[in-house]
């Protein structure tokens, strides 16, 4: 006999039913009983362990509405939580592609389905009391049953759904049963770039309220008299009859500013000499809204957001957004994010000078924008809407970008998703821009929605990047949008827009922070600071997305990304694209961004007088109220003096010139060949919630005098008979001196062994090196590099001869770097000079084949014994640095262990290079060392993993160390860029020149 099954109403495939039994949208607030301020007695949190059962599809559901049904043999699961994090269903990461057939509004019949159940005890039900069940986030849709009766349905995963369940509950025990489906018709509008998870992933709670109560309110602030006076307007809606309401406004100290009674559902509160809210000074008032039986407390930030003369202003001040895109993401809890987790993110952001957040690509938890108001972040609040998969069906592409949103069946949903976002978060000062969604194309539904938003809330700006594409024959009307916004635009295209168009410009996504990179942050901010209408941008993105899978036997964390769960479709490690790791360990990208957006910028005015121009890059804060400056005088990278410059009185956006108190006598005492730089360190001088006095805010380094090049060519001291002996046969040249014996491989044009004091210091033959383990930012150029066989290149020697003169032995080679089935990559003339003391100078003159792509790098690769584990260098450090990614590094003298230089990216790739080096020494505890100089600054990399090992492994925990130390000594390394999603690496950062000249000397001790 077949078991009894529950038949759902199938609202989840009916675009005309978005919500059933739901209350109208309202702003987020928690009501309190009179006299309460914390731990509201009106709210019962229903988080915790719920009964749980997983089904492969909704047609298998047992009929739990039958009389006497017992929830036996159910599992238990934490609420809030994502079921995939507890072993149900499977993990799936996909970026653009829908994980189901393109068949709107239908979803697969095999639709993973969850049943949640818990008991709700209700002791008593006073007459006139109402009970509201709130779900702050459920993916993707859900049916709510109270005591076996269907009470409602809702979708829009990242928005609050509130149900009046007064008529369904009774005194005593009540059953709450929730059926959650993985997919619904709304899933076509929730195609965000993230792991696809399911479940009740945000808080669930019951609110009890009087029958007549405040349903909603809208706080608006208006500034006048040149921003010196304010008026707070509060508009009210009531459920049932209007109730008397008294509002009291207090300042941050608790002092009463105003008190008045609401009349005709609205209230006007004048504020003389208001303290205005901004991200640098997030000053909040408190509005206590008191009805006879409950009180609501709302934080109020008084501020304005306007476009004045095509420039975005806050409180009449031009601002720049130094922002990030942030998902709700955690490697252990998935979408479920606590306040503590969110505060950790905000703290790291404040430490890194970040002032703005785009909630990509959906509303964050309803309390999140309140935290941003409290701690000071500008928020672009984005609706839960993306339909990127419309570009991916067979025959699709950018021309079908708007296919879904231009269908009438989705018009109501587009408006609904935006209304739920705007109405919920409207009372937060941090929210300054509404975003209608992400990557869904454009349509009349968006235009109608935009007009509704601007009519409903004229106090904020409106943006939607999808409006920049015209598809499906639709002619876009963008008149309701205040900002022109794009993603990953190249700097030339931005300049072109700014020259021809009036609207403020914003990059809602830029400098894709995937793996090693991005390398073009400074370039973009030079452009941002050069144009007043360029409001700034939001880095993609804040954190890597991955699933924590435990620890290896040797203590390495295991993180999985797309494809590691056997899912289809997936997009690999494209989700591992943040400035911090999944467990919030900052990547070098965050340090780079922090210094690019430092609060002060300095430029040298007159080197000989040590005069410096300072520019305050803050929008609202005088430097003297925020930081002090400390200066360091460095000679050849070593600090020889320090100066406490103290506080500088410099208003926002202001410039001033200061003179540094450098003693000329101190300079005269330095070597005439010494390079001289000034490093200005910006130190926080006040206590703030997330950062303390003494926190380092950033630095500038100013070059006063270039150092004399330390390069010395191997050679003798004049005419004499050399003590070096040379033996030669068809394939080898043996060069021997007093304490050394070098074997040169004529077939490969380099040394096979370097024996010094009876020890070979290279464990494999010396190699010419043009390859690097591809970075994520090489993902587009990589195929061209591999087609050119750069990863399989080898030398072909045409002739070799030896000469000796003035105590120097020279091995001359004419060779090419080539590969199978490929023309010459690089033609080289190389001369290896060997001095009587064993010093080697390599002079390489090359001509690159311009028909082939630019090179990843060019240089030499050494395989040294593992005892060479200490590195001392004069160059850019202490973190990794590249030609386009070095603003978090400074030019100095550093002493590091090889093992400490490695940067542990989840997807192994090129890492830990150091740019602009003038001297390098690798040494062992025994005292042996290799000292390296070059005719021009060079790059180097010392590590324990070969580039082949890094390139071959999919995860960092799979890597196997080499026995020795690998040293890459580079003439140049191409930059990192951000071409994993952004524009191609700028030509100025490519190793693209035709003529190459690399002269480097190795001295041994």
Image: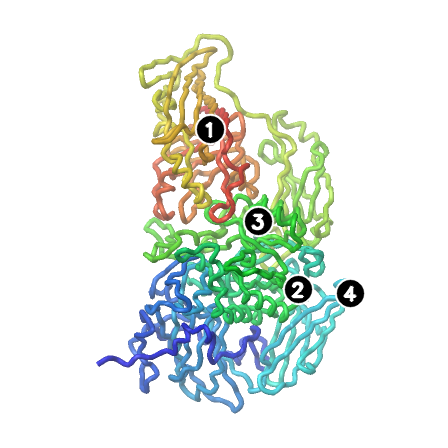
Q: Earlier in the sequence, mark 1 or mark 3?
A: 3
- Counting from the top left corner in percent of width and height, residue 494 is at 60, 48
> What residue is disc 4 on?
225
Closer to the eye: label 1 or 4: 1
> What residue is disc 2 on?
283
Closer to the eye: label 4 or 2: 4
Counting other residues with Cα less than 10 Å from the Cα at mark 4, is it few (<14), some (14-19), or many (20 or more)? few
Asked whether residue 598 is in view, the answer is: no
Q: Are marks 2 and 1 in contact (CB under 8 Å)?
A: no
Q: Earlier in the sequence, mark 1 or mark 4?
A: 4
Element type at marker 2? loop
Q: Residue furthest left?
A: 1
| Residue appearing at x 47%, y 83% in the figure | 165
Q: Find the distance from the CA under tag 2 to the CA under tag 1.
A: 59 Å
> What residue is disc 3 on?
594
- Quarter that holds the N terminus: bottom left
Instruction: Name the mark on residue 848.
Output: 1
Closer to the eye: label 2 or 1: 1
Q: Find the distance from the CA under tag 1 to the CA under tag 4.
A: 66 Å
Q: Are marks 4 and 2 in contact (CB under 8 Å)?
A: no
């Amino acid at each position: 006999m077949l078991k009894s099954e529950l038949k759902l109403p199938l609202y989840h495939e009916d675009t005309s039913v978005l919500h059933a039994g739901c209350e109208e949208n309202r702003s987020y607030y928690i009501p309190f009983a009179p006299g309460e301020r914390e731990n509201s007695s009106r709210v019962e949190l229903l988080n915790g362990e719920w009964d749980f059962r997983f089904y492969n599809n909704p047609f298998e559901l047992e009929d739990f509405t039958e009389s006497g049904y017992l929830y036996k043999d159910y599992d238990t699961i934490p609420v809030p939580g994502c079921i995939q994090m507890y072993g149900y269903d499977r993990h799936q990461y996909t970026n653009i592609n829908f994980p189901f057939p393109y068949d709107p509004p239908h979803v697969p019949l095999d639709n993973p389905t969850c049943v949640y159940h818990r008991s709700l005890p209700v002791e008593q039900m006073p007459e006139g009391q109402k009970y509201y069940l709130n779900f702050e986030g459920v993916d993707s849709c859900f049916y709510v049953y109270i005591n076996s009766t269907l009470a409602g349905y809702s979708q829009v995963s990242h928005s609050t759904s509130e149900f009046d369940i007064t008529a369904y509950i009774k005194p005593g025990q009540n059953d709450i049963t929730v059926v959650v489906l993985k997919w619904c018709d709304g899933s076509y509008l929730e195609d965000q770039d993230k792991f696809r998870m399911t479940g009740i992933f945000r808080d669930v709670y019951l609110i009890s309220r009087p029958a007549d109560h405040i349903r909603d309110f809208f706080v608006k602030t208006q500034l006048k008299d040149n921003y010196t006076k304010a008026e707070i307007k509060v508009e009210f809606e009531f459920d049932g009859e209007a109730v008397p309401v008294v509002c009291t406004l207090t300042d941050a100290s608790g002092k009463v500013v105003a008190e008045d009674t609401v009349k005709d559902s609205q209230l006007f509160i004048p504020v003389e000499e208001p303290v205005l809210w901004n991200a640098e000074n997030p000053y909040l008032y408190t509005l206590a809204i008191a009805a006879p039986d409950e009180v609501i407390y709302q934080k109020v930030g008084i501020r304005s957001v306007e476009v004045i003369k095509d420039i975005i202003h806050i409180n009449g001040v031009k601002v720049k957004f130094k922002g990030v895109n942030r998902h709700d993401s955690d490697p252990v809890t998935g979408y479920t994010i606590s306040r503590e987790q969110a505060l950790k993110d905000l703290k790291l952001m404040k430490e890194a000078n970040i002032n703005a957040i785009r909630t990509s690509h959906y509303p964050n938890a309803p309390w999140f924008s309140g935290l941003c108001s409290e701690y000071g972040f500008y928020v672009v609040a984005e609706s839960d809407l993306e339909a990127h998969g419309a570009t991916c069906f067979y025959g699709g592409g950018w021309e079908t970008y708007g296919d879904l949103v231009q269908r009438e069946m989705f018009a109501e949903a587009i408006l609904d998703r935006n209304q739920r976002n705007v109405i919920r978060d409207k009372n937060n000062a941090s929210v300054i821009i509404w975003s209608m969604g992400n990557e869904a194309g454009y349509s009349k539904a968006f235009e109608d929605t935009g007009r509704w938003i601007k009519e409903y809330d004229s106090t904020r700006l409106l943006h939607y990047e999808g409006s920049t594409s015209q598809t499906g024959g639709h002619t876009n009307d963008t008149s309701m949008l205040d900002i022109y916004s794009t993603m990953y635009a190249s700097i030339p295209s931005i300049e072109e827009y700014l020259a021809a168009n009036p609207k403020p410009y914003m990059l809602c996504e830029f400098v894709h922070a995937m793996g090693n990179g991005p390398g073009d942050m400074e370039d973009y901010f030079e452009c941002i600071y050069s144009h007043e209408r360029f409001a700034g941008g939001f880095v993609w993105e804040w954190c890597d997305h991955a699933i924590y899978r435990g620890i290896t036997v040797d203590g390495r964390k295991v993180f999985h990304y797309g494809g590691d769960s056997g899912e289809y479709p997936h997009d690999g490690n494209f989700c591992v694209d943040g400035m911090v790791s999944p467990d919030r360990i900052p990547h070098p990208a965050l340090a780079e961004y922090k210094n690019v957006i430092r609060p002060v910028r300095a430029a040298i005015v007159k080197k000989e007088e040590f005069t410096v121009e300072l520019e305050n890059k803050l929008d609202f804060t005088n430097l003297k109220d925020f930081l002090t400056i400390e200066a360091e005088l460095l000679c050849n990278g070593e600090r020889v003096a320090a100066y406490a410059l103290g506080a500088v009185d410099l208003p926002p956006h202001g410039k001033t010139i200061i003179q540094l108190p450098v003693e000329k006598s101190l300079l005269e005492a330095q070597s005439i060949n010494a390079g001289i730089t000034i490093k200005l360190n910006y130190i926080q001088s006040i206590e703030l919630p997330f950062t303390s006095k003494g926190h380092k805010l950033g630095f500038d380094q100013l070059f006063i005098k270039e150092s004399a090049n330390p390069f010395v060519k191997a050679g003798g001291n004049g005419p004499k008979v050399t003590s070096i002996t040379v033996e030669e046969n068809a394939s080898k040249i043996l060069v021997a001196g007093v304490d050394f014996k070098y074997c040169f491989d004529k077939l490969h044009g380099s040394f096979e062994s370097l024996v010094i004091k009876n020890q070979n210091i290279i464990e494999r033959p010396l190699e010419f090196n043009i390859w690097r383990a591809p970075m994520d930012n090489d993902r587009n150029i990589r195929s061209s590099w591999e087609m050119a066989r750069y990863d399989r290149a080898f030398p072909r020697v045409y002739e070799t001869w030896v000469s000796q003169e003035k105590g120097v032995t020279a091995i001359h080679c004419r060779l090419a770097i080539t590969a199978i089935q490929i023309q010459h990559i690089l033609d080289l003339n190389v001369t290896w000079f060997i001095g009587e003391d064993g010093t080697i100078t390599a002079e390489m003159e090359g001509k690159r084949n311009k028909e082939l792509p630019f090179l990843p790098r060019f240089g030499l690769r050494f395989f040294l014994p593992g005892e060479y584990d200490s590195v001392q260098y004069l160059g850019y450090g202490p973190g990794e640095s590249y030609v386009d990614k070095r603003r978090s590094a400074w030019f100095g003298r550093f002493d590091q262990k090889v093992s400490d230089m490695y940067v542990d990216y989840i997807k192994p790739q090129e890492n830990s290079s150091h740019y602009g080096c003038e001297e390098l020494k690798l040494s062992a505890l025994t005292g042996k060392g290799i000292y390296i100089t070059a005719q021009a600054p060079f790059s180097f990399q010392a590590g324990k993993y070969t580039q082949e090992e890094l390139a071959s492994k999919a995860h960092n925990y799979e890597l196997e160390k080499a026995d020795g130390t690998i040293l890459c000594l580079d003439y140049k390394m191409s930059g990192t860029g951000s071409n994993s999603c952004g524009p191609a690496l700028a030509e100025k950062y490519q190793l693209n020149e035709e003529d190459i000249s690399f002269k480097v000397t190795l001295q041994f001790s």
